Amino acid sequence: MTLTQEQQSICNYQFDKNVLIVNAFAGTGKTSTLVEFCKTKSKEENNPSMLYLCFNASIKREAETKFKDLKNITVKTTHGLAFPILFKKFKDTKRLGNLYVKHIISSKWFKQKTNKNKYAYAVIDLIRTFWRSEYTSLEDFITSYESNEYYFLKKHSFITYINLDGFEVPKEQYLDMNIVYENLRKLWDDYLNDTSKYPVEHDLYLKLYHISNPKLDNKYDYILVDEAQDLSPVVIDLVMKQTNSKRIFVGDKHQQIYSWRGARNAIQYIQDNYDDVEVKYLTTSFRCPSHVAEIANRILKLKGETKDFIGMKSILNDVDVRQPITYISRSNIAIISDIISNIKSTPDIEELKYHVIGGLQGIGFDLFQDLEYLNTGEKYKIKSSFLKSFKDWDSFIHFVDDTKDKTMKKNIEQYFSYIKEFKSIANMITIFNSALVNNQKYAKRIYTTAHKSKGLEWDQVSIMRDFKDLIEEDKNGNISHVKSGEELNLLYVAFTRSKRYIEIPSTLDIDEEMLQRCISYLNEQAQA
């Protein structure tokens, strides 16, 4: 393999500093660079022991194939690293499952008489945040969390009505955080003592492993962490404590798209919060042609990136009608709506021949089918253990209203709109399946969300119109808002899936003049 200068620099790095950060732009060969890095160090240092940590099982299988010739490398997922503690603490895997409100409410120590669902829901939310955090002590976590209480309270607030001069007036109410913390402590004590046999979530046994203060640096000379732009704080802390190991974090800080799950951008976080860190870049893409790189660079410049994303030699941005186009959306709903629109406009549905990355279940059909089963009283057919936990439809609706679950409310609205259109979800699935092909190479249209597209690539990409406008202008034509943060990252991920042709809505496309106007606006906002 012929390495670029940037790749060679990474492979030859002698660790003058004990932590190496590699910020690898889209399609720049980060995995192949890691393989070459490991081969180089194995030769230089007589097969040092190496641990490669990755996010999920599919990445692990791919890595095991690529590292198969290097016997000194152990490949694990972050949760796989902690898996043995599951057996040590809980004896087997039968306890694996999700913690639900019903488990909290049925606990002997839960004494709340009013707003039971709300408090139980908040306690579950907070203990999951603790499990993902860098804290090994619950009390330290609570102390640090007190400064974030406002956002938590807003998230779990609810509306009651008071009588004001004869009128029922809505008033926002907040939970008592002292009660939340009290129940949080009792739940954590129950888990530590294993007295109530609650379900064991994956993040729980990872936290227990973290608390055990494992000494990985006694076993591994190198620890390599992939997809470091979306790590939970617990993983960052766990790896950074292995000070006797040389640590390498690889990822693309502009592809962080899971902060809503509590993930942290380790690429940026470690640079900002630790000393003894070296930063290197991979900027030359082996995937994207120059016209795609040019579009992606505008997004990067809006984010303040000073390095250029370099595409391959220019390829004409012309669509090949003989080849499928992959449609990338912001949401599942946009995919479903587009398929419905095509079904209505196509005389022979089977000729549509579309493919959905992750299948119909990946865009919410399992949920909609389960909602139908719950609504029609066929609980025995429900797959979701969450929905199965409700006595009936009315109790489920009461819970959703009680906890102010906006996502589930939207799902319920969609469910009823599909019922109106197709009479039943079962009928809708039958119609959708009639045009679905399981192998994307036989498809005319391929659908995926931006989140699911990460790590994938296609020759032809079309960005769907459900992404929010890149900029907003007031009535005088002055910029009033520019998209930022993770929304920009999602666009960058979506754009850089293309290997040849790309089509983007005009609301997401900006020329050089508009780019400079946006940068000036952002600079003014930063100084204000």
Image (cartoon, grey):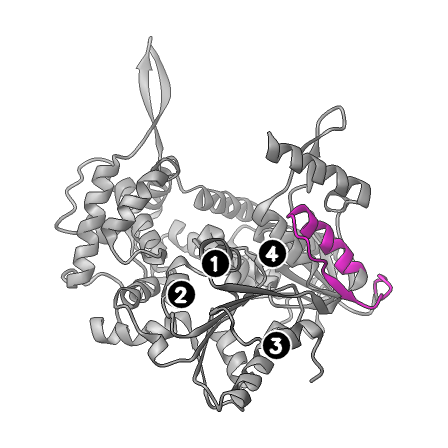
Disc 2: which residue: 240
Instruction: Kindly state the secondary structure of the residue where label 4 is placed.
Output: helix
Disc 1: which residue: 270
Mark nearer the viewer, 3 or 4 = 3
Whether label 3 touches label 4, CB < 8 Å: no
Mark nearer the viewer, 1 or 3 = 1
Disc 4: which residue: 254
The residue shown at (45%, 58%) is 274
Q: Is residue 16 magenta?
A: no
Q: Residue furthest front?
A: 16
The quadrant of the picture occupied by the N terminus is: bottom right
Q: State how far apart marks 2 and 4 are (Cα).
A: 22 Å
Q: What is the three-letter code of the residue carrying label 1?
A: Ile
Q: State how far apart marks 1 and 3 are (Cα).
A: 21 Å
Of mark 1 and mark 4, the one earlier in the sequence is 4
Q: Residues within 10 Å of mark 4 (few under 14, many from 20)?
A: many
Q: What is the three-letter code of the residue carrying label 4?
A: His
316 or 465: nearer the viewer: 316
Of mark 2 and mark 4, the one earlier in the sequence is 2
Disc 3: which residue: 33
Camera sees residue 481: no
The residue shown at (16%, 46%) is 110
Q: Is residue 296 magenta?
A: yes
Q: Which residues are magenta?
A: 291-319
Q: Residues within 10 Å of mark 1 (few under 14, many from 20)?
A: some
Left or right relative to 151: residue 195: left
Residue 466 position, x and y percent, is 65, 46
117 or 125: nearer the viewer: 125
